[in-house]
Image (cartoon, coloured by chain):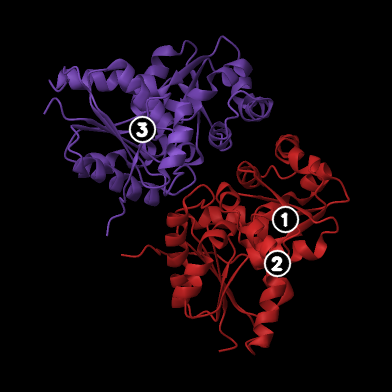
Chain colours: A purple, B red
Amino acid sequence: MNSKPIGVFDSGIGGLTVLKEIVRLMPAENTVYLGDTARVPYGTKSKETVSRYALEDARFLLTREVKLVVTACNTASAYAIPELKREIPVPVIGVIEPGARAAIEATRNNKIGIIGTEGTVKSRAYSKTIQAMRPAVETFEKACPLFVPLVEEGFSHDEVTDLVASRYLKELKAAGIDTLVLGCTHYPLLKETISGFMGEGITLIDSAESTAAEIRGLLAEMGLSNDTDRTSHSFYVTDSPERFSRVGRLFFGERLNGPELVHVEAN
Amino acid sequence: MNSKPIGVFDSGIGGLTVLKEIVRLMPAENTVYLGDTARVPYGTKSKETVSRYALEDARFLLTREVKLVVTACNTASAYAIPELKREIPVPVIGVIEPGARAAIEATRNNKIGIIGTEGTVKSRAYSKTIQAMRPAVETFEKACPLFVPLVEEGFSHDEVTDLVASRYLKELKAAGIDTLVLGCTHYPLLKETISGFMGEGITLIDSAESTAAEIRGLLAEMGLSNDTDRTSHSFYVTDSPERFSRVGRLFFGERLNGPELVHVEAN
């Protein structure tokens, strides 16, 4: 059981930021990654559709005998975690709770900003989770739909992105937050741009790091940590393996094995 | 038969620019529009996946008894027209041929630029079609992936979009083209931004207009034009009717009837 892989799914490429943290923190773990590139993005789609896709993604990971399912996608985490926990017979971890917990630990003035996709912000999942943990916290949410295409276009360090960031973030800055949750897997690639605008006093919360730490804790607690010294990392996509490899390097570095094309739609 | 609707499908919202031209040019025609918003966008996806989706979309339109299928999406037109013509038992029209023909009529110096999604540009469908019609024409293609999200974010007239346009279009300008094909349904909303950068001497080809003209000709030729004075326009989407209505206004004006949610995946 312990040598079974950790399964990670995402709407596409962005979840590689979460996988990267998992591999960095737990180098002895095997992993299986699924990117649903045939239906990406999830961030503009409805709760019903995202939940259906997430369930199909998780069920595919089960066929790869994973010991744990990680919902790396913030939108899927925001919409589908309760349903996934009900339907999937292995532990399911999303990125919202770890991110919310890290934000609460970081804030000094109890004012937390959250940026994410349209879906994540519409769900108010981060605000609800944060306020359930600490009711005194005030939250400020802002959807930043252009950040994902800007990152995928390779514009992470670019005057275009600086301009878009200033547009999206000015209200959060004016609100006086001291902590900002990067509530989308792509946003860690914009850390410099975002902190350049927000200023150095603002703590950026990377859900990828918090989620990896939470997974390590959970595996240890359940006695499921692996300790082999030869690990394997498998990649599956539902479309365009070539594009995944190419753009995936922005997120994961050079270590991407050629991803395998699969279909996950329920018939 | 004549009163049967014209069927139009697109990956999402953008095809409304084509529908708008159809309705403007043929106000007596009934129409049915399908936006595949559960799987949008098509522009970054593979030929195989886009063709599968296009076929499912067209088959849905057949269930609405359309007399003609219009592939409003450039990427689907670039990849799937031969397969659609083979599989669909009513006439199928894409946007590539009408756009290519209009560009050839417009060019004086035989240098034509084409902008579109990653998929459309990768397929080189416009270049192939143009050069088959007139081999002397030189073509220059450029993918502009940020234009679609910029339009959907409401940034059609914005300094961010000016900056992105100058980045994407500078090579085409330097190449000395006199005609530029707007090879994506969203781009007509950027006409002012694009001609602002390219200069007034450049003719912009809107595939939506050329396609509507071609449909009118085809219907007349086949004796299938409608002449009732009460028309209906139905809208179907595969996800998020509310978002479709809201963003669709940018493309179609105020006349959008509440779209109906449907599933089109083959089982």
Q: Secondary structure at mark 2?
A: helix
Q: Secondary structure at mark 1?
A: strand
Residues at discs 2 and 1 in contact (Cβ within 8 Å):
no
Task: Look at label 1 and name its amino acid.
Answer: Val
Task: Look at label 2 and name its amino acid.
Answer: Met
Mark 1 vs mark 3: tell me if same chain: no
- In the displayed structure, does residue B202 sit left or right of residue B42? right
Q: Distance between the Cα atoms at labels 2 and 3?
A: 48 Å
Residue B43, horizontal then vertical, whole percent: 54, 50
The residue labelled by disc 2 is: B133
Instruction: Examine the rendered structure and indicate whether residue B214 appears above or below residue B261.
Output: below
Q: What subunit carries mark 1?
A: B
The residue labelled by disc 1 is: B181
Query: In terms of depth relative to the viewer, which is nearer, B62 or B90?
Result: B90
Q: Quadrant of residue B168?
A: top right
Q: Which mark is residue A72?
A: 3
| Front tag of 2 and 1 | 2
Q: What subunit carries mark 2?
A: B
Decide if residue B237 is in sight here.
yes
> Residue drawn at (48%, 40%), measured in percent from left and top?
A122
Count of labels in the image: 3
Residue A59, horizontal then vertical, whole percent: 24, 45
**Dot 3 alpha-carbon crowd within 10 angstroms: few under 14, some 14 to 19, many 20 or more:** many
